[in-house]
Image: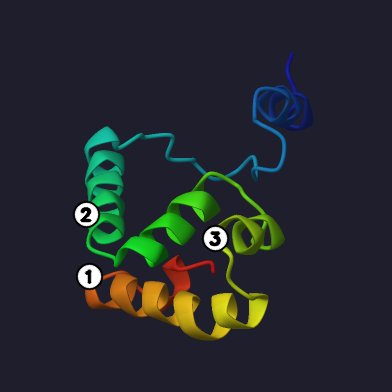
Amino acid sequence: MTTKNNTNDKFRQNTPAGFPANQETDYSYDPMGDLIRDMDVRTTVESLPELEKNICLMLMAGEKVNAICRELKISAHSFWNKHIPIIRDRFLEYGFEQNEIYF
């Protein structure tokens, strides 16, 4: 005879950590949505002026701000106060939301 607690324990054992055992989780994957977002990012980056495009590509590659400034021979002040606003404004202009821009 199986008690209610034993049934719930078995269900919890098969539930991924961090997910409530009493809710269904949507594991669907939208590859077309990812492709469209990637294309949108590429289109936006390609539309940037050359220096801002290089900055953006270096940021996307994981380069640190100091390394980018050193390689492109720009000051950190110029990086944050001139170039990043241009990049941010272009992403907003191309339809990205403020909460999607992490720089």
Residue holding disc 1:
94
Q: Earlier in the sequence, mark 1 or mark 2?
A: 2
User: Which of the two marks, 1 or 3, is nearer to us in this view?
Assistant: 3
Q: Secondary structure at mark 3?
A: helix
Q: Earlier in the sequence, mark 2 or mark 3?
A: 2
Q: Which quadrant holds the N terminus?
A: top right
User: Which of the two marks, 2 or 3, is nearer to us in this view?
Assistant: 3
Q: Quadrant of residue 91?
A: bottom left
Q: Residues within 10 Å of mark 1 (few under 14, many from 20)?
A: few
Q: Amino acid at mark 3?
A: Leu
Residue holding disc 2:
43
Above/below status of 93 relative to 35: below
Asked if disc 1 and disc 3 are in contact, CB closer than 8 Å, the reply is no
Measured in 3D between alpha carbons, the distance from the residue under mark 1 to the one under mark 2, in whole angstroms, is 9 Å
Report the residue at 54% width, 86% height from top. Answer: 81
Report the residue at 46% width, 68% height from top. Answer: 101
Residue 9 percent coordinates (x, y): 76, 28
Using residue 52 as the reference point, say whether residue 79 is left or right of it: right
Q: Amino acid at mark 1?
A: Tyr
Residue holding disc 3:
72
Residue 56 percent coordinates (x, y): 44, 58
Q: Which quadrant holds the C terminus?
A: bottom right
Asked if disc 1 and disc 2 are in contact, CB closer than 8 Å, the reply is yes
Q: Amino acid at mark 2?
A: Thr
Total numbered labels placed on residues in the image: 3
Using residue 100 as the reference point, say whether residue 41 is left or right of it: left
Using residue 34 as the reference point, say whether residue 80 is left or right of it: right
Report the residue at 22% width, 38% height from top. Answer: 32
Given the current orientation, which residue lies at the most extreme bottom position? Answer: 81
